Image (tube, rainbow, N blue to C red):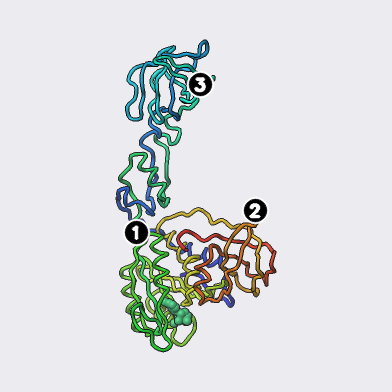
Amino acid sequence: MVDCCSAPGLMPFAQALETMLAAISPITEIENITLSEGLGRVLSSDITSPINVPPHNNSAMDGYAFAQDSLVAQRHLRLVGRSMAGQPYQGKCGQGECIRIMTGAKMPEGCDTVEMQENCQVEGENVEFLAPRKKGDHVRYAGEDINQGHVVFAKGRRLSAIDIGVLASLGINDFEVFRKLNVALIATGDELKSLGEPLGEGDIYESNSYALAGMLKNLNVNVIDFGVIADDENAIKTAFIQADEQADAVISSGGVSVGDADYTKLVLEQIGEIAFWKIAMKPGKPFAFGKLPNSLFFGLPGNPVSAMVTADLLALPALMKLQNYQPTPTITLKAKTVTALRKSPGRMDFQRGVLSYDNDGVLLVNSTGSQGSGILTSIASANCYIVLPAEQGRVSAGETVDVRLFERFFS
Ligand code: AMP
Ligand code: MG
């Protein structure tokens, strides 16, 4: 299926991402939801506005509404009524008249301008306007935020908290989204103990599935946790088959290298179409991608840093495509590295850093220190990747480097 690295050498990161995305067809199943369930869901069709927002011309100030040409020859107008938010003035405001009006209240018929109350002197029914006003001042017009019939959000948008507010302002409570993805997580390794179990000699706590589950929940997919599977061909095969039956995508970690206990490759060649890639990226060289009978498969390296970074940079974009989400392009910034960065040419590095500004407003980046692929705290304290191209060697302090802010799903 996927053209992979049967060729000698490593596959460039960009090529791996592109090849993988090209092999994925987004899901088509949709469901109806109500607004309160909408956060993080992906729209399956454009949403157009059924109304103008705001629905009527209204005042942007607490003050007095009037027809601006009333004030051409005089500075005094007669107060004839009130327009409050939700309780508009019912009559028509004539020449020489004004209406007390509150912020958000509907502009009365006959009025085109509002003066704020601070610029008015009121004595009984007599309102004196202390400053001149241009026609239309302090008026918010119907439809100036959103016009009736216009596309508010396009298909493929992932609804943010603000988007939910916008939809509420349009009175939209029911709409269609793509169904949620189901993603199975499998950790492989004889040395991995689940939380609560005692650690034997040579054991470690299984941590990848927790971090991956967090990233997946941020992406608003359902996580099916298969826990820890031993380094055993049959156990792995059983788990992969069960996961494939239940999930749209299966993500495993560990067992994709070439060690004696790395059965992932063996099993997957039996039950799916899998490409094993050696990607020219660091961390995260070994990575498997392919298709099981019913699902996509991502085989992440076991080292926690490698697992997180390949999940973030490869598996998550793939899942976004699968769920029809079209994210805005990632922004790359230029920053001056405060520390020298160790690097040998060959692979694209995604080192972890902390962005800051110096007193002159120059963007700086500090490495989080040791970048070993087992050192998860190198990500925990970071807010960005320092992206160093494959051919790059060591970087001296003070040089300019590319920096990519962490996505909100990641950290
Ligand atoms: P592997 O890719 O299976 O050779 O694993 C590489 C390294 O990552 C080993 O040190 C494993 O103990 C560690 N590792 C693998 N899976 C996990 C996991 N789920 N949680 C924490 N560490 C892991
Ligand atoms: Mg292992």
Of the residues shown, which amino acid type is indicated by label 3? Answer: Lys
Distance (Cα) linking label 3 and label 2 = 42 Å
Residue at image point 63% right, 67% down: 389
User: On screen, 330 above or below 163?
Assistant: below
- Check residue 361 in the rendering and tell me which mark sits there, or answer none: 2
User: On screen, 46 above or below 29?
Assistant: above
Q: Residues within 10 Å of mark 3 (few under 14, many from 20)?
A: some
Q: Which residue is mark 1?
A: 180
Ligand 1 closer than 8 Å to label 2 CB: no
User: On screen, 250 above or below 331?
Assistant: below
- Residue lying at the far front in this picture: please name it: 123
Of the residues shown, which amino acid type is indicated by label 1? Answer: Lys
Distance (Cα) linking label 1 and label 3 = 51 Å
Asked whether, in this view, residue 32 is left or right of residue 405, the answer is left
Q: Which residue is mark 3?
A: 135
Camera-side residue of 196 and 187 = 196
Of the residues shown, which amino acid type is indicated by label 2? Answer: Gly
**Front: mark 2 or 1:** 2
Q: Residues within 10 Å of mark 1 (few under 14, many from 20)?
A: some
